[in-house]
Image (cartoon, rainbow, N blue to C red):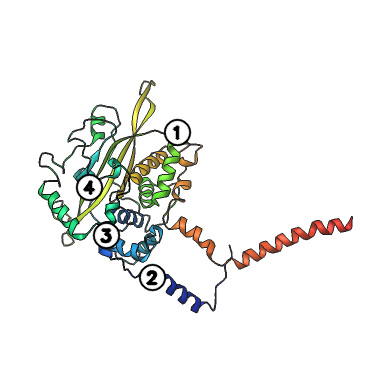
Amino acid sequence: MGYVAVKGGTLAIEESLKRLKYERLKKGVVVDCQRIESGMRCLIDQVMSESSLYNETLAALAIKQAEGSPEEAVFLMRAYRSTLPRNHYSRVVEPEDMMVERRISASFKDIPGGQILGAANDYTHRLLDFNLSEESDEEAINWVCDYVLEGGEGNDRTDLANLPKVVDYLRENGLMSVCDNDNHEPDDVTKESLQFPASRSERLQILTRGQTGAVTSLGYVALRSFGALHPTVGELRMGNLPLYVDNPFNEQNEKDDGYYIGEIKVTEVETLFPEDIQNINGEKEIEFKLGYGLCYGQNETKAIAMSILDHCLEVGESEHAINDEEFVLLHIDSVESPGFISHLKLPHYVTFQSKLDSVRQSKKEPALNQGKE
């Protein structure tokens, strides 16, 4: 594809940037980054997930600069991420160590530890609340204080840091195969270009970094069209995971000699897919297979869709495009796909002139042939 450099347009570009700033400021109100961070939680989580950078403050700044455009905010965050040094790697994070805020299962009514609804839009009426247009900071502070005094932050009866997994129950009862631990160092798609066939660690990274709408759309395709899958959510949990790094001054990296550096909020989903298998006697049996999704923040729809696509790509070897890792992984990236579409706005003078010449020539040839007759 041919491109040409645009020369002599510096002044026009500068004026375009001024106009962009004018559009952001013309109503005379400046959006405060702290208000974005506190009031746009779901958008913050989406941008952090797609940019692979967990920093709510930077995400709020990117959203402000991008005037609320998620794809532009992700672009800004990834560009900034590429400038950061990588000083440490965290120790392996175990999802079982999550301090749970929300935990539901569509597979069982009663699960050990109970269903914990937490904060979610699932149970709202989806009606516009016009009272929010008059909401004040003072009212918000008073409501939060009353809520905390009522004990609304949680109860003391459930150990939210040690809730058992639903899939462990299925494995204990022989309804799901036990997975062996894979202790190989995972591939890093931010340091090495993706190669096919991709490893599962690469696939999961790209899925969790994928554009939320694209991942959700392809997950929906897998449900209603190609393959006609209908999994059941074994468990969806959202909460905070602790992060530790090894002691940099201890060469042996003893297990108990690490540093706690903070926590990250994530959404984890394990979906169950019934599949026909053959046992050792060659007899047909049904067993559950697993699809896995994990995203930064509270990002439930994407995490479920991610788990569906994870299963589709694990199965592979199908005539359906949804099982083709190249098709899925190369079309969901939050920067690649919008960027390639947006590049159509760039000058294509050379290629278009070539097309024009071809069209003109094709118009001339019938006329010339008609004149000869």
Q: Which residue is mark 1?
A: 228
**Does residue 245 show up?**
no
The reply to whether dot 3 and dot 1 touch (C-beta < 8 Å) is no
For this rendering, which residue is in front, 251 or 352? 352
Helix, strand or loop at label 2? It is loop
User: Which quarter of the figure is the N terminus placed in?
Assistant: bottom right
Instruction: Report x, y in % for residue 253.
Output: 17, 55
Query: Quadrant location of residue 369?
Result: bottom right
Q: How many residues crowd around disc 2 within 10 Å: few (fewer than 14), some, or many (20 or more)?
A: few
Q: Marks 3 and 1: which is nearer the front?
A: 3
Q: Earlier in the sequence, mark 4 or mark 3?
A: 3
Q: Which residue is mark 4?
A: 239
Helix, strand or loop at label 4? It is strand
Residue at 50%, 38% in the rendered image: 320
Q: How many residues crowd around disc 3 within 10 Å: few (fewer than 14), some, or many (20 or more)?
A: many
Q: CA distance from mark 1 to mark 4?
A: 31 Å
Q: Earlier in the sequence, mark 4 or mark 2?
A: 2
State left or right for residue 268 relative to residue 249. right
Q: Marks 2 and 3: which is nearer the front?
A: 2
Q: CA distance from mark 4 to mark 3?
A: 18 Å
Q: Earlier in the sequence, mark 3 or mark 1?
A: 3
Q: Which residue is mark 3?
A: 37
Q: CA distance from mark 3 to mark 1?
A: 39 Å
Q: Marks 4 and 3: which is nearer the front?
A: 3
**Does residue 294 show up?**
yes
Instruction: Report x, y in % for residue 308.
Output: 38, 40
Q: Which residue is mark 2?
A: 26
Name the amino acid type tagged 4.
Gly
The reply to whether dot 1 and dot 4 touch (C-beta < 8 Å) is no
Q: How many residues crowd around disc 4 within 10 Å: few (fewer than 14), some, or many (20 or more)?
A: many
State left or right for residue 260 relative to residue 180. left
Q: CA distance from mark 2 to mark 3?
A: 23 Å
